[in-house]
Image (cartoon, grey):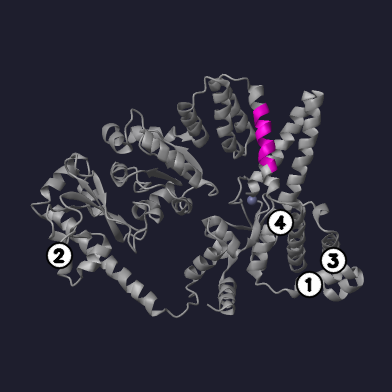
Amino acid sequence: MENTEMEEFVNAVRERSDIYEVVSRYVPLTMKSGRFWACCPFHEEKTPSFTVSPDKGIFYCFGCHEGGNVFKFISLMEHITYFEAVKLQAERLGIKMPSHKKSSVEIKTEQEKEALQRIAFLARDFYHNCLIKSKDGEAGRKYLAARGITENVIQEFSLGFAPDSWDALTKQVMAHGYSEKQLVASGLAVEKKSGGGVYDRLRGRVIIPISDSFGNAVAFGGRILVESENQPKYLNTPETEIFVKGKLLFGLDKSARAIISANTAIVVEGYMDAISLYSAGVKNVVASLGTAFTEEHAKILSRYARRIIFCYDSDEAGQRATMRAIPMMKNTGVEVFVLIVPDGKDPDEFIRKHGKAEFDKLLENANSIVDYQFQYKINHIDFSTLRGKFQVLNEMFPLCAEIKNTVIQREYFKKFSNVLLIDESLIWQEWQKFLKSANKNAVKNLPPPSKVSLIRQSGGDIVKTLWYEPELLNYVNALVPTENFLSVHLEIFNYIKKCYAEERTPNVLNSARELTSEANNEISRLLGKYEPHEMQMSAFQDSVKIMRRLALEKTYNQINTELEEFFKAGDWENYNEKLQSLTDVQNKLAELV
Ligand SMILES: [Zn+2]
């Protein structure tokens, strides 16, 4: 794809996007003194400080200082990258993305995928008809009825039944003109070890079609009717060109609406759990198909809900899977909870026995992840010794560092103190050590030379953007202490500020008279480098963040040195006060990540 063609595309999408229209799809806007206002969708507030200026095509929040153009807004709201936001907005506006000519290989792959999709549809209908119409299907009907799965749910999930035959499905699919090779590629048939030919993979099982988020069947799961030693309880078709486990959440095609309206997604381990909860009326549920919950899964769910409740089996395997799933949610900004079904039951068993009302109660009392992980650690680490106690603490601290509210953080320390039977002041001492080493590691990643070049690069990006958009001055002022700028950038910054105060536009003719030659050279170097608007805006946003981080890290180190002195002097009053400001800085740093 030609770059210029891409740029034209992005420009066209931006020009045709009305930021007022886009924003008001998410938050209601009201007009006041020449701008549109709303309560900010990016931070909690009661009085509006979020503004939209349609003529400039930008939004800006005076509360949390989030700001940018229409694509930035969409990327933040939808938790997608900047370029994904461009594509999404293009789709909404019906603007086609420039595409390259397809090669013959690509055309062939596409045709193969289409064939797999059609085979999957054939199989789904075949299994479903077997279940509801055939005599063979009676066993399946009985099994589902015994599990409390209604006709409606059978229809909605297109549940089916695979007869106990070696070739029932194979025959059916081949009658539609597909080859054995295609059947094997679809995962529905398996090659015979000897003598050639193929046989049905799923036999004598209740069939659960696995659909993508558009509702297209792409794979199948089969559950045996009577559990036995030499047969796996569940058997699924393998991954194929159209089925990638790590990217698919079972049930999402049906539950998306309920997830959005509850703003909560419940994640269970298997499809039978999901179907069971769904048929009991808990509709905001998806399953991760017995495979590990991936970062991709996390990303998908974060587009639908701000809260996720993991509800895996309460046995050791289920709990280990939960511990592995939790870190995947990092960086999604979603609140995570864990529900442990009591009495060692899985959610399917529980809801069948106790009903929806009881399950709703469990949901209300789901554990925060810190509580859950603390529980998990004390179940797995012997904390009768001091060493064990410190091990628990040190494994909990990285989680505590992610809590932005210091009051809540303290509550946890109190709890640790009570459960581990260890003095709270000892916990604070350990916490101090942890913060120090965490900070050392953060600074280690930034050796001095690269720090200087970072400051040069970021300061340049910032003043360049301000040159064109001086109304962003307040934004920069609020977040970045200018003493960290290189002197040449500071000079340009002050010039822009002066122009803005005098209501004139910065321009190179005037600046030639008003600035030193060094500053003039720098500004012509910066302005001479053309960048598409959105690239520049996103570089600007990143640069503000980098400069803010560097400034905060500097403050952090200063406070740390002071803390050490108070500590040595035994000046606890000042020590505690400083400790609070250290935590504040730490929290601000955490917000940048
Ligand atoms: Zn805000």
Residue that numbered label 2 is attached to: 172
Q: Earlier in the sequence, mark 3 or mark 2?
A: 2
How far apart are the alpha carbons under marks 3 and 4?
21 Å
- Please report the bounds of the magenta region as a residue range: 429-440
- Magenta stretch prevailing secondary structure: helix
Q: In front of the other: label 2 or label 4? A: 2
Marks 2 and 4, how far apart at CA: 62 Å
Q: Earlier in the sequence, mark 2 or mark 1?
A: 2
Q: Which residue is mark 3?
A: 499
Q: In the image, which disc is placed on residue 496?
A: none
Q: Mark 4 and ligand 1: say if the CB distance to the nearest ligand atom is below 8 Å.
A: no
Classed neighbour count for the residue bearing mark 4: other residues with Cα under 10 Å, few (<14), some (14–19), many (≥20): many
Residue bearing mark 1: 525
Mark earlier in primary sequence (1, 4): 1
Q: Position of residue 250 (x, y in %)?
A: 34, 51
Q: Amino acid at mark 3?
A: Cys
Whether the magenta-drawn stretch holds residue 417 is answered as no
SS class, disc 1: helix
In the rendered structure, which disc, 3 or 1, sits on the residue that comes first in sequence? 3
Return the residue nearer the eye: 593 or 504: 593
Q: Which residue is mark 4?
A: 544
Task: Give the total of numbered labels.
Answer: 4
Q: Mark 3 or mark 4, which is nearer to you?
A: 4
Is residue 436 in the magenta section?
A: yes
